[in-house]
Structure formats: structure tokens, C-alpha cells
Image (spheres, grey):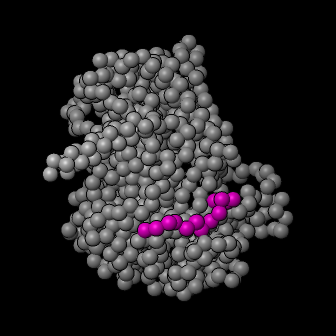
């Protein structure tokens, strides 16, 4: 007995030593580690329920670009099979109805237009399925038969000629639309996106929709006879946000065909999903269009032949997305955004019996299901997104993307926090503590603000916060008013009044962390991208408490953006016309307070950003430079609102760290 006890004790001590050694051998996350992380998306379960297709994107630093490959993996687990190779990117994996093939969109050469390709589900060489002169935007297989649904942009004359050099010749932009710009796209014209069908083997697709409107989000009816889609078919589509759900006959090729209008809500309706019997269409709806993107996205249902729409989530007051009917048609699944989480929920078709199906400290970004089995794309605070199966109330990890990178990395402690703002409003957020956190020390702290403003921080892997934590900083990820996940009133609180209540909320978060003893009040930094940069601008024009600021893709003099960015409609709806209501625009423009900035500030953005144009950063930079303040401007050429070139992503992260190191001085020992 004594011998066994000694053996057990020895094994126990050996185990403790092994754990301690493992912790000691792990290292801090680096910029290079982040560049090696991969991204999963586009979950698609096969018709027989035995396989899951998905995409994996990764960065190729040598070629300085990203590559997206398509994989499939058995639902029961096992090794993934690569469907596409390493010499081109693929997207939109779709299973053929007979379960034998995977189709996808790809451009195999740099100058090619995207086409539909098809490959055996077990891998092998892919064959091109379409040869559309102008290329293909998206595709879906009919649930029965052998037919493809395509979304195509109207062809330009030069795209229909045999001379391909014609396509490359520079031509003047002739503009007559009110909405005439779009980030990542460029100047907008009258060549619209419409629906087509194509039988594989045929060379010419059959056009189903027409007119000076864009059609999107098409979905086949279960019997393959009709297609639901989203379109704004009002007299002035550029002057409102009134997208509706429509249905078109998939077999009627005539131009004068009559469409069935399913929804008549004067606001936005989108994301249609058919019931199994084809009699109803679930969708996402906005019921209060007067408050724009601050309005709650509700779940609704309507007869597929048109008629009255019933809102199923009136009392929920949280954003929903990606609705799908259950197999028996009695309930609808959807993603639910609430209080720093994104979960899978369901509700009966009469609006009763709301159930949170997969919940917890998680962030679900996509899902699919077959029979009683779900596959979800899910992330956690210290784990990047992976595929999980959910059967009999049990989650099982299916993929292990990034294990090769993260298994040897030290994880920071991520703590969800609750506190009250200056006016007593409850606020939530997250504190990401530095690796090897010592509660006896006070740490230099970065207030890192999310974009939107209508978005939220949740339990997903935040690579920027992780990098800061690995570099010795405590990171505050706050969901101030204007954020989603906390109801419409919370979200719309900053309507036409940016930089006031949201400023109070993030500053209260800083004070909360100081009061907890986590933060060194003399070593504060603030930053963010997009609205995160905009709120950063408000922060540094209202206080000098911060030693460094990082303002990415932010706005400054708002009236200068009207007609220059792509927000003409929402600007008008929120602030009025700039020449009629100039005071409202100027009151919230941070540029007017640029002389108050004393915080050393790094300004950044993409040269071709038409979401939040680089003009704003240039103005703020020049203002600070003229005033003799510490500042720098970094412009990434040929980049839009989101920086994509791997070498630029690397450069941005390194500049973040260098700026913080220079002005916050993290090298000094944290206060005890």
C-alpha cells in the first residue's frame, strides 16, 4: 500500500512538473505568429450529411498576397481533403444535388474573370463549368435536377468582344447615379446584377430578372421551381434603403414576366429562407428605418405568395442573422447577437418558445445543419474560429486550424467586465490581461475601440488585443453605447450625436480598470480602426490623459466626406443635407477641435478607401503638424477600408507596437 501511494505521489509530482515546464516553454505571441494564422469560412454540409465543405484563407508572405483554398472533412471527424490547389484561390463551395461534386468560384489566372468550376468531392483536377464573358458573382445549385442559379453583372460592350485587350483599356467614368461610389468596387454605373439560370453544358445562361436594379441573395425554393431574392425596386433605389423579398419563376424565360413581391415593408428586408413546404419565407427585417443602422434586425416570416409579414422577435430586441427553417418547418434557427456573445438560437414559427440552442462564452459566425446535426463556425477568446459539430447537446471540435501556431503560445486572461458609465448606464466589455499577469502590478493599458459603431466585442479571438497583451499591455475592449448586442435604445443613443455618450462609456471603462488596480494611469494609450478611429479622435480632442493614440481609417471634417465617401444616403438621413444643416455636421466633427490634441498620434489608412477616405487622416495629420504636435501619417497604396496585403498588415502591427513603445514606454517596470 505504501509503495502504491509513493508511486501515485511520484506520478502526481511529475505531472505538476510537466505542466509547469509546458507553461515555461510557451512563448509570447508575435507579429509573425499572427501572420501565420488561418481563417475558416463558408460552412456547407453535403446533401447526405456526411461531409462539410469550407474555405481556409492564409497569407503567403513571399508572394505578398492571400490564398483561399477549399476543403472538405468528414462530419464524423478525420483528415480534411483539399479540393483546390495552391496556385489559385477558390470561394463559395457548393455541393451538387447528387452529392458527387463540389463547385466553386475561381480565377485561375490573374486576368481571368471568376467562373464556376467543378471538382470531384474527393479532390482532383477541377473543370470549368461556366464561360461567362463578364464573370460570375455567385452560384447555387437547384435542389432538384441539373441547373445552376447565377448572379451576373450586366455585360459591358467591350466584354462581349473577342478582343480581350479591349477590357483593359482605360475609359472615362460616366456618372448619372445618386449612389455613384462604393468601396472595393469604385465608381458605380448602370450595369446591374441580375439572376440567370444555366444548365451545365449550355454556353448561354437564361436571364430571369431585368431592370435598373441590383438583385442579390437568391435562394431556390425546395421544389426548384422558384427563386427568392432581395432587391430595391423602388423608383429611386439610391434614395432609400427599401430592399424587399421577391420571387421569380425559375422556368419562365420571358422578359415581361411578373415578379411576386413577398414583403412590402418600407425598410430593409433581406436574407430570405424557404420553409420546407415552400409556403413561407423567413427573413431579416428592419421595422424602424428612421434610425438607420442603429435599428434592431428582427426575424420575420411571410407567405411566399405575398401578404402580411409577421415579426417573430418583437420582444427579443437583439440583432438576428442567417435564418434557416428546421427540417419539419415548425421552427426557425438563427444567429443571435447579445451581450458580448454570438450564439445559435431558434423560435417557433408563431414566435413562441425562444430557445438558445448553442450558448456560452462563444462567438458563432456561421452554421449549417442536416437532420439533427449542426456544424458551426465558432471562436473563443483564446481560440481562433474552427468548425464544431453539435449533436445530442454535445459540441465536438472538427477542425484544428492554427493549432500549429497557437499550441506553443501563452494565453492571456480574458475577463468580461460590468460597470456603470458617468450617468449610471450599465456598460459591458472585456479586459485582456498581459501574459504572466501579476495582480500586484499596474500595467500600461491600451483602450482599443471597435468599429461600426454598430458592432460589438464578443468572445472571439482578437489578434490585435492578443498581440498587445503579449507585449506587456493590458487591453480594454469596451462595448459603449452605439454597440449592438444590448438592444435598440442602447444602440441608437448616439444617433446624430457621436463622441458624447460613447466617449463617457469608454472613459468610464478606463477608470474602472484603474480602480481595480490593473491600470497604470500614467501609461494610457487609445486607438482603433474605422469607427474605432473616429471615437479615438473624440477621445484625444476631449482629454490629454493618453500618452499615445493610433487612429486608423477615421473621419475628421464630416462635411468634406459628403460626395466623397459612399455614405451619401445615411449622412443625409442622420445629419440632414450639409448645406442646410451645417451646424449638425460641424458640431460632431473632431477636426474642429484638432488644436486641443496634445497626444502623439499615428494616423493610418488605405489610399483608395471610399468608406472612410484617407482625406480625413490627411487633414488631421496636417492640422497637428502645423501646430507642432507629435504625429505621423502612414498611407497604404492601393488599399481600401480593410488592409489586405500581408506585408502591409505586418507593417501596421509593427508600427502599432513601435508607437506604443516610444510614447507609452512599456519597457519600464510596471508599477507595483
Depicted 486 relative to depicted 666: above or below: below
Position of 309 compared to 96: left or right? left
Using the image, determine if residue 670 lies above or below residue 640.
Answer: above
Q: Name the main secondary structure of what is drawn in magenta.
A: loop
Q: Give the residues in magenta.
A: 77-89
Q: Position of residue 650 (x, y in %)?
A: 58, 37
Could you say where residue 226 lies in the image, as x and y percent from the top left? 49, 81
Q: Is residue 375 visible?
A: yes
The image quarter in which residue 77 lies: bottom left
The image position of residue 76, as x and y in percent, is 41, 71
Residue drawn at (48%, 55%) of the image: 401
As drawn, is 590 to the left or to the right of 158?
left
Which residue sits at x=54%, y=65%?
71
Question: x, y percentage for residue 480?
Answer: 32, 38
Q: 241 or 641: nearer the eye? A: 641
Residue at 31% over, 22% down: 442
> Position of 119 compared to 420: left or right?
right
Q: Is residue 309 visible?
A: no
As drawn, 598 above or below 79: above
Q: Quadrant of residue 671?
A: top left
- Which quadrant: the C terminus? top left
Which residue is painted at 75% across and 58% down in the image? Answer: 111
Amino acid at each position: 500500500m505504501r509503495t502504491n501511494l509513493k508511486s501515485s505521489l511520484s506520478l502526481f509530482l511529475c505531472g505538476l512538473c510537466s505542466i509547469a515546464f509546458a507553461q515555461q516553454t510557451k512563448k509570447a505571441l508575435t507579429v509573425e505568429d499572427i501572420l501565420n494564422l488561418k481563417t475558416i469560412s463558408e460552412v456547407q454540409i453535403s446533401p447526405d450529411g456526411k461531409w462539410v465543405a469550407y474555405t481556409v484563407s492564409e497569407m503567403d508572405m513571399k508572394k505578398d498576397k492571400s490564398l483561399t483554398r477549399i476543403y472538405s472533412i468528414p462530419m464524423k471527424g478525420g483528415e480534411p481533403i483539399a479540393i483546390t490547389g495552391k496556385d489559385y484561390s477558390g470561394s463559395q463551395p457548393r455541393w451538387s444535388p447528387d452529392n458527387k461534386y463540389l463547385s466553386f468560384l475561381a480565377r485561375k489566372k490573374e486576368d481571368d474573370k471568376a467562373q464556376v468550376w467543378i471538382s470531384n468531392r474527393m479532390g482532383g483536377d477541377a473543370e470549368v463549368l461556366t464561360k461567362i464573358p463578364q464573370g460570375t458573382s455567385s452560384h447555387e445549385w437547384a435542389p432538384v435536377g441539373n441547373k445552376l442559379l447565377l448572379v451576373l453583372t450586366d455585360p459591358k460592350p467591350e466584354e462581349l468582344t473577342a478582343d480581350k485587350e479591349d477590357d483593359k483599356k482605360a475609359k472615362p467614368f460616366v456618372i448619372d447615379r445618386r449612389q455613384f461610389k462604393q468601396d472595393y468596387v469604385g465608381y458605380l454605373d448602370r450595369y446591374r446584377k441580375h439572376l440567370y439560370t444555366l444548365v451545365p453544358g449550355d454556353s448561354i445562361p437564361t436571364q430571369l430578372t431585368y431592370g435598373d436594379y441590383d438583385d442579390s441573395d437568391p435562394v431556390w425554393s425546395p421544389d426548384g421551381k422558384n427563386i427568392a431574392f432581395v432587391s430595391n425596386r423602388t423608383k429611386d433605389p439610391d434614395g432609400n434603403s427599401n430592399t424587399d423579398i421577391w420571387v421569380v419563376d425559375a422556368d419562365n424565360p420571358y422578359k415581361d414576366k411578373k415578379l411576386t413581391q413577398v414583403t412590402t415593408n418600407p425598410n430593409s428586408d433581406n436574407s430570405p429562407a424557404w420553409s420546407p413546404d415552400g409556403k413561407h419565407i423567413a427573413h431579416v427585417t428592419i421595422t424602424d428605418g428612421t434610425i438607420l443602422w442603429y435599428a434592431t434586425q428582427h426575424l420575420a416570416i411571410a407567405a411566399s405568395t405575398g401578404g402580411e409579414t409577421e415579426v417573430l422577435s418583437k420582444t427579443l430586441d437583439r440583432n438576428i442573422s442567417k435564418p434557416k427553417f428546421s427540417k419539419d418547418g415548425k421552427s426557425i434557427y438563427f444567429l443571435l447577437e447579445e451581450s458580448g456573445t454570438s450564439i445559435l438560437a431558434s423560435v417557433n414559427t408563431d414566435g413562441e418558445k425562444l430557445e438558445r440552442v448553442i450558448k456560452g462564452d462563444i462567438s458563432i459566425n456561421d452554421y449549417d445543419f442536416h437532420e439533427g446535426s449542426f456544424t458551426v463556425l465558432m471562436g473563443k477568446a483564446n481560440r481562433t474560429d474552427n468548425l464544431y459539430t453539435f449533436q445530442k447537446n454535445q459540441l465536438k471540435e472538427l477542425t484544428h486550424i492554427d493549432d500549429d501556431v497557437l499550441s506553443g503560445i501563452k494565453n492571456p486572461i480574458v475577463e468580461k467586465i460590468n460597470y456603470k458609465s458617468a450617468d449610471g448606464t450599465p456598460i459591458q466589455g472585456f479586459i485582456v490581461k498581459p501574459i504572466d499577469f501579476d495582480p500586484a502590478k499596474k500595467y500600461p493599458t491600451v483602450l482599443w475601440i471597435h468599429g461600426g459603431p454598430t458592432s460589438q466585442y464578443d468572445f472571439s479571438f482578437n489578434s490585435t488585443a492578443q498581440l498587445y497583451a503579449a507585449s506587456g499591455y493590458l487591453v480594454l475592449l469596451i462595448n459603449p453605447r452605439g454597440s449592438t448586442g444590448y438592444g435598440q435604445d442602447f444602440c441608437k443613443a448616439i444617433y446624430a450625436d457621436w463622441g458624447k455618450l460613447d466617449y463617457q462609456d469608454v472613459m468610464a471603462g478606463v477608470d474602472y480598470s484603474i480602480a481595480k488596480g490593473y491600470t497604470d494611469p500614467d501609461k494610457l494609450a487609445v486607438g482603433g480602426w474605422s469607427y474605432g478611429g473616429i471615437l479615438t479622435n473624440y477621445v484625444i480632442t476631449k482629454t490629454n490623459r493618453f500618452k499615445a493614440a493610433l487612429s486608423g481609417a477615421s473621419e475628421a471634417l464630416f462635411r468634406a466626406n459628403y460626395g466623397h465617401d459612399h455614405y451619401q444616403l445615411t449622412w443625409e438621413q442622420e445629419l440632414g443635407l450639409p448645406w442646410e444643416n451645417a451646424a449638425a455636421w460641424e458640431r460632431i466633427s473632431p477636426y474642429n477641435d484638432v488644436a486641443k490634441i496634445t497626444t502623439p498620434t499615428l494616423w493610418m489608412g488605405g489610399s483608395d478607401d471610399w468608406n472612410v477616405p484617407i482625406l480625413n487622416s490627411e487633414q488631421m495629420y496636417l492640422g497637428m503638424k502645423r501646430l507642432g504636435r507629435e504625429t505621423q501619417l502612414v498611407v497604404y497604396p492601393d488599399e481600401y477600408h480593410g488592409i489586405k496585403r500581408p506585408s502591409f498588415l505586418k507593417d501596421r502591427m509593427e508600427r502599432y507596437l513601435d508607437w506604443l513603445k516610444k510614447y507609452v514606454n512599456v519597457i519600464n517596470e510596471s508599477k507595483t
